[in-house]
Amino acid sequence: MATFIVLASFTDQGIRTVKESPDRALAFKAMAEKMGVSVKAIYYTVGHYDVVTVAEGTDEAATALLLKAGSLGNVRTETLRAFSVDEIRKIIGSIG
């Protein structure tokens, strides 16, 4: 399974309904599980991004999940594919 770091920012709609955000986070986690993505952590942050999520799944499942979440209109996301130390060792080893 691939690991993804999802950086999310509230949209105008999302910040207007920020009080519902914790419930939306739980709904996102349930939706992810149904789509084959495991949400490892959700953190609310202060700064450029409002929420940081760590998730695991296939590229296809994670992409579908984030497209679906984005279509709800509460957040915009930037997603980073993350690699463990062991995964990056293998990748680096393949470059000779």
Image: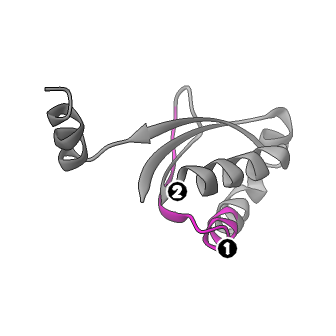
Q: Residue at x 59, y 69 (%)?
A: 36
Of residues 70 and 96, the one nearer the viewer is 96
Provide the residue span drawn in magenta. 28-46
Q: Residue at x 66, y 72 (%)?
A: 30
Q: Which residue is mark 1?
A: 34
Quadrant that contains the C terminus: top left
Q: Residue at x 73, y 61 (%)?
A: 24
**Residue 9 rendering spot, x and y as whole percentages:** 66, 35
Q: Residues within 10 Å of mark 1 (few under 14, many from 20)?
A: few
Dot 2 amino acid type: Thr
Q: Which residue is mark 2?
A: 58
Dot 1 amino acid type: Lys
With respect to residue 70, does 25 lie above or below? below
Label count reads 2
C-alpha span from label 1 to label 2: 13 Å
Q: Is residue 58 left or right of residue 31?
A: left
Q: Residues within 10 Å of mark 2 (few under 14, many from 20)?
A: some
Of residues 86 and 91, the one nearer the viewer is 91
**Nearer the N terminus, badge 1 or badge 2?**
1
Name the secondary structure under disc 2. Answer: loop
**Residue 48 rendering spot, x and y as whole percentages:** 56, 26
Q: Is residue 81 left or right of residue 32?
A: left
Quadrant that contains the N terminus: bottom left
**Residue 78 rendering spot, x and y as whole percentages:** 59, 33
| Image quadrant where residue 82 sits | top left
Of residues 26 and 85, the one nearer the viewer is 85
| Image quadrant where residue 35 sits | bottom right
Name the secondary structure under disc 1. Answer: helix
Q: Is residue 92 left or right of residue 66?
A: left
